[in-house]
Amino acid sequence: MSLLRGGRAISALSILAWDQEHVSVESVQAIMQGCLDKLSECTCPLLGGHSLSDVEQKFGLSVTGVVEKSLWRNDGAQVGDAILLSKPLGSGIITTALKRKLLESAPQAIESMAALNFKAMQVLQDFSVHACTDVTGFGLVGHLCEMLNPAISIEINTGAIPLLEGALELAKQGVYPGGSVANKKALQARVCNQSELPDILFYDAQTSGGLLVALGAKEAQECLRALRDLGVEATWVGTCVCKREPRIKLF
């Protein structure tokens, strides 16, 4: 996977599968309005789309865009690079708690998942990014593994990782999705875990997670300031080191 440096969305088409038995007209209207709000945020027009009745609610977009600069690969990190994370972790845990009716609401998680990575991408164009990927279904560890190359391993200071409100307590209670458990089973052999935090947090399957960015340590603080000036609460969470086994260290 590569991320688009300077990628620009130019149009979108929507697909709506409406579960009319369980989802109200008002909810569908809210889904569509949220879509339009996010497309407007990145100046991408919705040209049309298709809708149908279904027994399971679904909504998505097909987006056409152009690359105006180049690609950021996910495996170009270098020894000494800083690893930055642009959103907190824990959305899989929080949404699982909502589904189990253990939480009545989760405004911080919703705000985080609704935030585009568009602003972060714009800021990062001004820096010498060596590698970049997003944190989604394979969790933090899974996407860190994507960033590995033959020259490096990655050390993560888990105490520096921002967590969504309530995620830590829920993880301690055993509240997390099956996808996070599957991630841990598949990936833990590549990890040296010395963290005192519940390790499922770092395998948690994220929805609309942030960016993981590797760039030179000399630029990291300036980059963090620029991101925070635009409201992106990014954090320096780790460092790329010379290759060793296991390839990922959590401490």
Image (tube, rainbow, N blue to C red):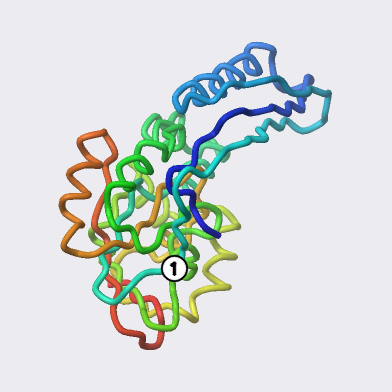
Q: Number of numbered discs present?
A: 1
Q: Give how far across and how far down residue 34 sits, in percent.
A: 53, 21
Name the element at disc 1.
helix
Q: Nearer the viewer, residue 196 or 10?
A: 10
- The kind of residue on which mark 1 rests is Met
Callout 1: few (<14), some (14-19), or many (20+) C-alpha neighbours within 10 Å?
A: many
Q: Residue at x 37, y 80 (%)?
A: 192
Residue, disc 1: 147
Q: Residue at x 35, y 44 (%)?
A: 164
Q: Would residue 110 appear left or right of 81 to someone viewing this image?
A: right
Q: Residue furthest front?
A: 68
Q: Residue at x 40, y 88 (%)?
A: 245
Q: Give how far across and how far down residue 198 sits, in percent.
A: 37, 63
Q: Residue at x 72, y 30 (%)?
A: 57
Q: Residue furthest top?
A: 26
Q: Give how far across and how far down residue 157 sits, in percent.
A: 25, 66
Q: Give how far across and how far down residue 56 sits, in percent.
A: 77, 33
Q: Nearer the viewer, residue 80 or 209?
A: 80
